[in-house]
Structures are given as structure tokens and as C-alpha cells.
Image (cartoon, coloured by chain):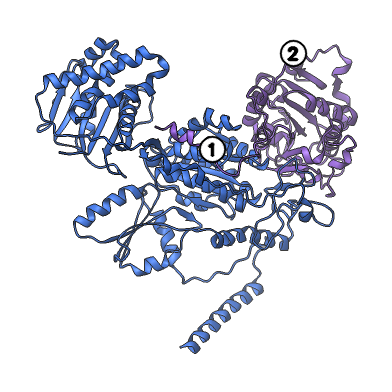
Chain colours: A purple, B blue
Amino acid sequence: MSSDVRFTDFKSDKQPTWCPGCGDFGTMNGMMKALAETGNDPDNTFVVAGIGCSGKIGTYMHSYALHGVHGRALPLGIGVKLANPDLEVMVAGGDGDGFSIGAGHFVHAVRRNVDMTYVVMDNRIYGLTKGQASPTSREDFETATSPEGTNMPPVNPQALALASGATFIAQSFSSDSKRHADLVKQAIEHDGFGFVNVYSPCVTFNDVDTYDYFRDAIVNLDETDHDPNDRDQAKAKILEGDTEYIGVLYQDENSVPWEQQEGLDQNMAEIPDGAPEDAMDLVREFY
Amino acid sequence: MPEDLNWAIGGEAGDGIDSTGKIFAQALSRAGRHVFTSKDFASRIRGGYTAYKIRTSVDRVESVVDRLDVLIALTERTIDENLDELHEGSVIIYDGERSTMQDVEVPEGMVGLEVPLKRLAEDAGGAIMRNVAALGAACEVANFPIDNLDEALEKRFGDKGEAIVANNRQAARLGQEYVEENYDHEFGYELATTDSDYVLLNGDEAIGMGAIAAGCRFYAGYPITPATDVMEYLTGRIDRYGGKVVQAEDELAAINLALGAARAGARAMTATSGPGIDLMTETFGLVATTETPLVVCDVMRSGPSTGMPTKQEQGDLDMVLYGGHGEVPRFVVAPTTVSECFWKTVEAFNLAEKYQTPVFLVSDLALAVTERTFPPEAFDMDEVEVDRGKVVDESEVDSWQDEQGRFQPHFPTADGVSPRTFPGTTGGAHMTTGLEHDGLGRRTEDTEVRKEQVEKRQRKVDTAREREEWDYREFGDPEADMLVLSWGSNEGAMREALDILAEDGYRVRFISVPYLFPRPDLSTEVAAAEDVIVVECNATGQFADVVEHDVLERVQRVNKYNGVRYKADELAAEIRETLAGDAATQDQEVEAQ
């Protein structure tokens, strides 16, 4: 790990095919900056991506990376981290990947509290399939598959996280690049599962949750008296529902990563050329 | 005087049937006798009917048989369930003082031994030991020295304190003495002991032990009958070697956890049964197309859907050979005995890493629940080899980078096997994806690159066919006109069936096939035989289909896989070319004649 790593070292030479103005550009830049600023380099970093526009991130970044199947990015990232806790693991996905097809994994990844970072590019729409309702779409949001709205309340990702025992919950906005990079950085530095939901507007298919909407609606938690270490305050803010807060909503300062609790500190890639020396003891157990 | 014995204890789930049976099996094994066990069980925690059966001999035993000599019946239903296997002279041990057993009628010709098991157990210190009192009674019937039980009781109850062990030993002796004093009957058994040291284990345990021996350090799974014993075996044990068992939220997560660990460089595995394989199939193509070494173990049970979770079937062969959308190579290895469960697991890890491909390790319920004796040398750890394949470290990484210094994880090599770097290797950073990708692992829809990658992945199979031995196990008469083929756990029963058939004058060549893909070419063997019979535990004959497929040579193949549909003129040209090739071959054949 060298200290002269710049965030562009995390950039691949592949040009993103995201629509011009897509929030994912800012989201990704913040991730790269945060990785560089926390002393990581591409050779010790593992990025896992889900499916959808956000899933392309592994291609546009330079690091060890795996682009998985839809919804399973979190188990992949946990597997990487447990096998080699020295790696910096960052999982990126969209709202569909994380809160619809992968919602079950989200709950259990939060519970397991492995030391990794999960960045969700939440645009409240399915973009790559050209505009259908997502789990975070508003109840009255009209799309090709919900012509009269979804008539269901949107998933509240932070509430889901808090109820599952989260130790770090943040909300950021892709166009507020400095603050976004800083929030991802805090998530990386957090000892445990760092969850950053990012308002990452879709300029093509979502004409409701736009840049203008977020600029107007956002309340910066840094400008309030919110104490992120106070779970009750976090709960109240998260359940309010109609305010778009950005900042760290909750952080458990006493968090101990699961892998540390379980005593995992070895690189599992390193194994002997044959059976372990005392392996015949395993056979003798069957006497 | 019979030296062999077919023995069982049966009752309701929750009666301690398994642990009692296991104590007796261990006692026999420690006395230098071979043991082969099986279980009748249902998918329930309490009630119903469950039994633990033991076949024991001084010689090797390979199978269960339809015969029961001594039965400890804790319920009346246990007798009814086993009427087919009980025979004239069979001994039934039961507690006639138990309220539910007072009206038991012992079938005609059989010997009923009423032993007050509960009362004897209470005399020894507690009613809970009634099953052990029954074991003592069984020792007397079988003429098996009761001292042999002591060590097994110590193993089972040692952690509960010496007093408990002593009480159990006493309960066993009270059971034995009761039979000795109250039944003046010559049972006719003489269970000899030998100096041989055997270990006793089941197929799931052998798979778990094989995984540790092979260097597996990461296991993720979701509990499911009959694969759970693999996970339970590894839990706690794999930790001693720096590994970890992770219980996932479902099988979707389990295979992805294992895949993540494998991408990080760990030897990783998951084990499940049919319903779990269905879920894992979602991720299977990703494992294969990202060329990640992974061992996926399927301990088969009766399907479809939830099927019969505690019953035997070999119904998943089509699934493991062909499951998943699209086409991608996978290896399928199916151990045929409990000890082979160990060795094939070791081999599965080597195949997975040498060819960077998922390996299905296919076992079945019969192997999973069978405990069998082996000399410990059957698991000689010095024989275990670990071959990690084409792993590239920092010193060699340069030679696998492109002109821009980018590592190429899917470089289309001549043998199809690409270099592999573990994360953390400087200069080896790369991505890979379930999208079709180029040599750099980046998505592409280029028709030429697509073709190149499909062929590269396929080439690994050709390479493996050349480099590895895909042999079969052969028994019986190699010159016989009758050929029997089978796969999986049928081997043991078929080997004993050969002896029975030989007594009736049948000469049979028996080939047991542990490799399902790639698999041995059986066309010569099939052609040489007059009758060919394929034996398997399923209704449609999935392996039989495979055998027939392999010997069929009539069809020529025209294929296109670059992502573009056929065009009419192109197709006409392809057909013409194929026919021309055909005609040329025929001409050559005519000339040769």
C-alpha cells in the first residue's frame, strides 16, 4: 500500500456508458476518492457489483472486481472479506439489487456486520430495463409497469438497516461530491458494515426524484443537532419519512466486525501443498 | 454358527435410536469387525418410526440386505415396519412392561425376548439408559463380549463424567445378565472379534474430512437433509486449520459466499441437496463463466420439489450435467463408496483449481447416512496432493499482462486454462463478470471475442480429457457377455449382487462409473457386451440416457454461438460444406476398401 495512490488509479480506461448527467458518475468518483484517501490501492481492493446500471461500476473502476448475478452482491463481498480480511471490500449496487431481489441478503449482511462498505445507488427507478417501478419508487410514481402508481409504500432502506442491527447508516447525494466522498470514507473507516445509500438521480426515466428535487428537499444533518451515536435520534429521523436527510444517521462506535469476533485473521488462500500435518488425527477421531 | 449379524434398533424419533445404534456400531468396529449401517428415518423431530440398522461381519460388508436377525423394538410399529426383513428364528427384544408394548404379539417362528429395559435401567441409575440395557441384551443374544461396549460408552458419555459412564456400563450388564438368566435358549450366534483397528464414518463425514485434507478453508451452506452432516462435521474442525463455516441465509447466499471466498483465493465449497441445487443453479453459470474454482456438493435425495427428504434417489444427474441457462463447462464427479467420498472430494478441489471450473461432487443419501468401517490407511493423508493450477504470483505477473500492463484473467491460452492471481497480488488486479467478457474480464459483445471465449472455456474440457485419467472401477468377470453399469452408491450392493448372481450361474462384468463429466468412453465396453444393463436409483434412467448418447454416432453438428442468428445463405453454405465433408469421408472409405 503506497501513500501516493491517487483516486484516478482506481479508474479503468473503459469509458462509462451511463447516460450523460447520470448520478452514478458522481457516486463512483466519490468511491474512488474515498478508497484513495483511506490508503488503499487497486491491488488490495475488491469491488463487487450487482446488476443494473450500477453493476457496471466494476468495469469502470480498476481493482480486483467481480460483477455478479442480480441481487447477490453482498454475499459475494462477505465471502471475499472472510477469506482474506486484509482486503478492502466495497460492494456497489442499485436499489433494485439491494432492496428488491437482494433484500433478504441486505438484512443478513447488516446483521453479520462484516467490515466492508456497501454503496447503494438509489435512483428510485429501474433504469437499465428502461423505466419500471423500483422498491424505493414513490407510491404514486407512474411507470410503464405501474401506470397508476405502485400503490405500495416505498422500502425505507435505513429503517430496514436499523431494524436489522446496523452499525453504520449514512445517506448521501451523488452531486454533493465532497460530502459524498467523505461519507463513503467514514463508512470505509467504520469497524463493521458501512452502509451508504446514495441519491443518484436517473436523468432519463425519473422525472420526479431529480437533481432539482433533491437540492430543494435535502436537509444536511451536519447543520442540525443530530447525534449519530444516539440510536433513538437516528430512529426518529429515519422513520420521519418525508425529509431527505444526508449525513451519518447512525453509527455504533463500539461496533466489532463479525470476522474479528470469530477470530478470522488469516488469508485463507495460503494452504499447504498436501494435507495438514496432523490430518491423521481427523481419521483417528472416527475410531 | 453364524458369524454375521443383521441387527437393528427401532422406535420413535426422539427415542435415542441413532445414538444407541451408533454405540453398538462403534463397539463392533472397535472389536475389529466390519460394519455397514443404514437408517430408516422420517423428516420429523419426534414420533413416527425410525431405525438404525447394522450389518456386521469379520469380512468386508458393502451393502444392506433384506434380512434382520436381531431387532430391538421400542415400539410395536417397529416390528410391523420390519416384517419383510424378519425371518424364522429372528430375535425381537422388547420391554413387555412398557404400557404400549404389553400386547405385542411376536410373529410366529420368531423369538420374543421380553426384557424389562426400563426397570433394569432404573436399577443402574436411571430410566434414560433403557436403550443401553437393550444393547447388553443384544450382546448376550449375539454372543458378543460385552466388554466391547465399554469403550463406545466412554466415547459417547465421557464428557458427562465417569459416574454416567459407569452407570451405562452397569445398565448394559444388567440387560445381558437378564437374558442370560431368564432365557435358556441357544441363539446360535458367535460374533468373533479381531485385532483389526477400524474407523467408522459416513459419506458426509468423509466429504468433510476430504475437504479439510484438500485445504478447503471456507464452507458456506444452508442446512438441508441429507447434506447437513458435511456442514456439522466441518463446524469447529475447519477452524483448527484457519478456516470457517458460514451458515448462510439461504442457498443463493451460500454459493455466492463460497464464490466470493474462491475469488479471494480460498479453496471453498458448499454442500446441499436437490432443492438447494435448484437455487444454486442461479449462480452456477457465473461461477463457470468467471472461471472460478468451486466445489458444489449435491447429496441427492428423492425429488422433485420437497419430494421425500429422507429417502434415496439419484435423480439429479440431468440437473448437474445440464442445469442452468446457456452452456458452460462443469465437471461432475460422483463417489461410489464412503471412502471414495473422501478421495473424490480431494480430487474435486484439484480439478476445480487446475481447470478453473466448478465441480459438482455428487453423493447420495445412501452414502450420506451409511456408516462404514475402514482401516485408517484407507484415508492415508500422505497420499493427499494439492495442485492449485496456474496461480501467478508477483514475480510472474508481468508475463500475463497486455501491452498496457493490464492483467488478463481470461487470456485464451492454448490449453484453455488462464493465469490466475489472488487479490492482493501487485499488478494482478482485474475484474471479471457474468457478462461475456474479453481476456481482460471486461464485458464484450464482439462476435469474434465471444467465439474465442466460448472455445477457450470448452478447450479446458479437452485439456482435462487428455491430462486426467477418467477411469472406471471394474468388478466381476471382465470376459462376460453381460455388462452392468452403474454410478454412485449402487456399487456396494451390486458387488454383493455379483456373488449372488454367480451362484445362479450368471457371469457379469460390472463397471462402476465415478466420473460423469468428463466421463470414460464406454463405447468399446458396450459394443463388446451382448446385454447391457444400467442400474440407478431413479425412474427414467438418466445415466442410461448418457450411455446411449455416448455410443450414438449418427448425428453431425452444425453450431453457431457468436451471438448472431443464422442467415439463410450462410446456413445453406454450412449444410453444403458439412455434406461435402461427409462425401469426402465416404470417398476415402471407398478408396480404403
User: Residue A168 location, x and y as percent?
Assistant: 75, 22
Secondary element under disc 1, as helix, strand or loop, is helix
**How far from the left and from the top, in percent, is residue B309?**
40, 36
**Residue B222, how many percent across, how many down?**
53, 32
- In front of the other: B578 or B349: B349
| Disc 2/disc 1 C-alpha distance (Å) | 49 Å
* Kind of residue indicated by mark 2: Ala
Q: Give the residue displayed 40% in from the left and 68% down from the top.
A: B524
Task: Report which residue position mark 1 lands on.
Answer: B212
Disc 1: host chain? B
* Residue depicted at 29% across the width and 11% down the height: B126
Amino acid of disc 1: Ile
**Label 2 sits on residue:** A236
Same chain? Circles 2 and 1: no
Q: Is residue B1 left or right of residue B166?
A: left
Mark 2 is surrounded, within 10 Å at the Cα level, by few (under 14), some (14 to 19) or many (20 or more) other residues, namely few
The answer, for residue B126, to whether it is visible in the render is yes
- How many residues crowd mark 1 within 10 Å: few (<14), some (14–19), many (20+)? many
Chain letter of disc 2 in the image: A
Quadrant where the image shows the N terminus of chain B: top left
**Which quadrant would residue A94 be assigned to in this image?**
top right
Against B331, is B273 above or below?
A: above
**B431 to A147, vertically: above or below:** below
- Is there any visible trace of residue B304 in the rendered image? no
**In which quadrant is the C terminus of chain B drawn?**
bottom left
**B98 sits to left or right of B512:** left
